[in-house]
């Protein structure tokens, strides 16, 4: 037997669990059942892919067994199991990106820590909310040696080899003594376990069996009774499932503890049949803008789990969408490579994207608050689609919102901008820059302010990219007010003045010729004496900086 230490981050997270920052401890069971369900999905898939794998997949199930005298609760599955190395890796450390960041934030803000941690499933560690000792016995399918892991959640755990472990994983919770007298927390009580499973895990597609006592003819026997309905939620119609069930399902697949912002259900019949249940989260994940961030819904084929994060089904700019797609006519054998080229998958992806964009559009007109949340969290990612998704460019432009000189705090849609355009105004004016303050104080802005032209204020890095690739909205071109000749004068005086100042202008051009192309009179300034503008086709200074940073 060996004693090992938890990784520092894991230890911190465990501390939070031991001192239970959640008001709702019941959810530990959902987490453990969710893990067991994943393990069953995995063993079925592994056995399917590798016919030689020594795995038993005859009666895949999750079992719950409570012992009132010992005060233990065991959650058992006969799924994929873990090797010793995997136990150390998966249970002893936290590999998720963003953990360090999350823990730092948690330390800074004491009050809303439950809120913060909600962005991040704590999974297995939630066992320590209800148990003061957890024993995990596991054997990986196809391997002979099992592993026993045990911890009290205080910094260290022990690990040892076992000869006679069954395939799969058993988690034995030694329940905290302080919960003993409180029937609300009696996790050995049949009614309590039934209630939790019904509330949180009903849709799990594997049987969850509870060991119960049956008395008949004065004789008491025990048996395992299935206590979940096992109905795949995505195959049910909206009125066959409750809002709460959808939310629980979202938590199961997303590992997010907060409610989704929007639920999108699709059921396509006909030659190519599929069901999709998609979710827009209410918060952006911490790694939304990290390069390795994963994307795509889970893929099932005829109720059989095939893969997590099916990126072939979702473009990068919609990487925050979670959900499940169940296709009827794909081979169970599909690989990621095949999926990328599959025409049916391409077709499905197009339909999913259209549906998502139209849902957001509907949200923007029916629920302004919700839409605002959406845009604040995901707008910067969505705008990447303007650069990459040519087919849906117009639909994306329609759901975009931008800061503008029209209002100090409200964003505007392009449609509203266009409706406010002045008589004779042909272009949609914008200025890009690092912040609103910098943009508002730019000398380029002076004449536009003086003449009361509305200018979009674009401060996201991605704005630089799309404004140079999107030609127009509603027939109106986008025009940077820092580029080319933006002439706002309404008389011929500039021309006359240019004649008057011709000598000065050519002297200045000559003197500054190493640094500039031309000096000209402008009507765009009101108080500043001079400003530097780019040529109509030049890259903007910000984009130039970005390119340089990218080494181009
Ligand atoms: P998550 O489920 O979000 O990955 P968890 O803390 O719940 O995080 O679990 C960590 C990892 O431990 C899982 O990803 C899985 O690889 C492994 N694991 C947990 N429970 C089981 C189980 N019952 N069977 C097999 N592997 C498991
Ligand atoms: Mg989990």
Image (cartoon, rainbow, N blue to C red):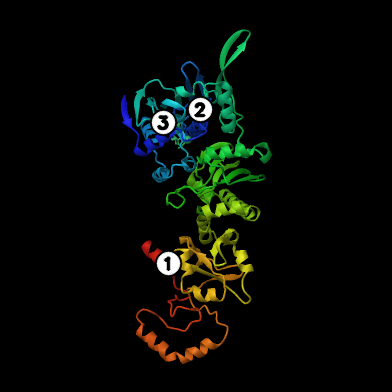
Specify the quadrant that holds the N terminus: top left
Q: Earlier in the sequence, mark 1 or mark 3?
A: 3
| Image coords of residue 324 (percent x, y) | 56, 42
Local crowd size for mark 1, using a 10 Å CA cut-off: few (<14), some (14–19), many (≥20):
some
Instruction: Confirm if mark 3 falls within 8 A of ligand 1.
Output: yes
Local crowd size for mark 3, using a 10 Å CA cut-off: few (<14), some (14–19), many (≥20):
many
Q: Find disc 2 in the rendering and name its residue.
A: 57
Left or right: residue 127 versus residue 416 is left
Q: Which residue appears at 51% of the width and 45% of the height? A: 310
Instruction: Confirm if mark 1 falls within 8 A of ligand 1.
Output: no
Left or right: residue 516 versus residue 267 is left
| Image coords of residue 187 (percent x, y) | 52, 24
Q: Earlier in the sequence, mark 2 or mark 1?
A: 2
Whether residue 25 appears in this view of the structure is: yes
Q: CA–CA distance between discs 1 and 3?
A: 50 Å
Q: Which residue appears at 40% of the width and 27% of the height? A: 143
Q: Dot 1 lies on which element?
A: helix
Instruction: Confirm if mark 2 falls within 8 A of ligand 1.
Output: no
Q: Earlier in the sequence, mark 3 or mark 2?
A: 2
- In the displayed image of the protein, which residue is found farthest to the top? 218
Looking at the image, residue 355 lies above or below residue 250: below
Q: Which residue appears at 50% of the width and 27% of the height? A: 57
Q: Splitting the image into 4 quarters, where does residue 125 fall?
A: top left
| Image coords of residue 443 (percent x, y) | 46, 74
Q: Find disc 1 in the rendering and name its residue.
A: 542
Q: Nearer the viewer, mark 3 or mark 2?
A: 3
Specify the quadrant that holds the C terminus: bottom left
Q: Dot 2 lies on which element?
A: loop
Q: Find disc 3 in the rendering and name its residue.
A: 82
């Amino acid at each position: 037997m060996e004693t090992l230490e938890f990784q520092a981050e894991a230890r911190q997270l465990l501390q939070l669990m031991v001192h239970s920052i959640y008001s709702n401890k019941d959810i530990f069971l959902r987490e453990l059942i969710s893990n067991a369900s994943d393990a069953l999905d995995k063993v079925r898939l592994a056995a399917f892919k590798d016919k030689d794998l020594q795995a038993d997949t005859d009666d895949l199930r999750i079992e719950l067994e409570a012992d009132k005298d010992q005060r233990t609760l065991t959650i058992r599955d006969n799924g994929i199991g873990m090797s010793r190395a995997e136990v150390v890796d998966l249970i002893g450390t936290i590999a998720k990106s963003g953990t360090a960041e999350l823990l730092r934030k948690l330390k800074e803000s004491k009050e809303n820590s439950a809120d913060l941690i909600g962005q991040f499933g704590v999974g297995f560690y939630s066992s320590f909310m209800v148990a003061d000792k957890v024993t995990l016995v596991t054997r990986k399918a196809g391997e002979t040696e099992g592993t026993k892991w045990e911890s009290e959640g205080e910094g260290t755990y022990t690990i040892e080899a076992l000869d006679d472990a069954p395939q799969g994983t058993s988690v034995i919770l030694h329940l905290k003594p302080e919960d003993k007298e409180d029937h609300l927390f009696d996790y050995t009580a049949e009614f309590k376990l039934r209630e939790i499973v019904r509330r949180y895990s009903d849709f799990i597609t594997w049987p969850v069996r509870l060991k119960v006592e049956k008395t008949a003819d004065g004789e008491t026997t025990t048996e395992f009774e299935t206590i979940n309905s096992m109905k795949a939620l995505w195959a049910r119609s909206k009125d066959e499932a409750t809002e709460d069930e959808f939310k629980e399902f979202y938590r199961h697949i997303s590992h997010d503890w907060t409610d989704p912002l929007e639920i999108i259900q699709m059921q396509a019949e006909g030659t190519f049949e599929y069901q999709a249940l998609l979710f827009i989260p209410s918060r952006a994940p911490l790694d939304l803008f990290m390069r390795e961030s994963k994307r795509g819904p889970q893929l099932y084929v005829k109720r059989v789990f095939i893969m997590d994060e099916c990126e072939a089904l979702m473009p990068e700019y919609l990487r925050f969408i979670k959900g499940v797609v169940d296709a009827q006519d794909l081979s169970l054998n599909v690989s990621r490579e095949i999926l990328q080229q599959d025409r049916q998958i391409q077709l499905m992806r197009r339909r999913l994207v259209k549906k998502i964009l139209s849902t957001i559009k509907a949200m923007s007109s029916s629920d302004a608050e919700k839409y605002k949340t959406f845009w604040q969290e995901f707008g910067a990612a969505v705008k990447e689609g303007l650069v990459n998704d040519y087919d849906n460019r117009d639909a994306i432009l329609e759901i975009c919102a931008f800061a503008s000189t029209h209002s100090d705090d409200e964003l505007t849609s392009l449609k509203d901008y266009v409706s406010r355009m002045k008589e004779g105004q042909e272009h949609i004016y914008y200025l890009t820059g690092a912040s609103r303050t910098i943009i508002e104080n730019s000398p380029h802005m002076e004449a536009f302010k003086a003449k009361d032209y509305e200018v979009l204020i674009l401060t996201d890095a991605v704005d630089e990219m799309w404004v140079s690739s999107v030609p127009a909205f509603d027939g109106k071109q986008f025009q940077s007010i820092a580029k080319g000749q933006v002439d706002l004068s309404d008389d011929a005086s500039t021309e006359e003045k240019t004649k008057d100042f011709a000598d000065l202008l050519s002297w200045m051009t000559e003197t500054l010729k190493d640094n500039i192309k031309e000096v000209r009179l402008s009507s765009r300034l009101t108080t500043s004496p001079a400003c530097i503008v780019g040529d109509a086709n030049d890259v903007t200074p910000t984009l130039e900086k970005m390119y340089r940073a990218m080494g181009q």
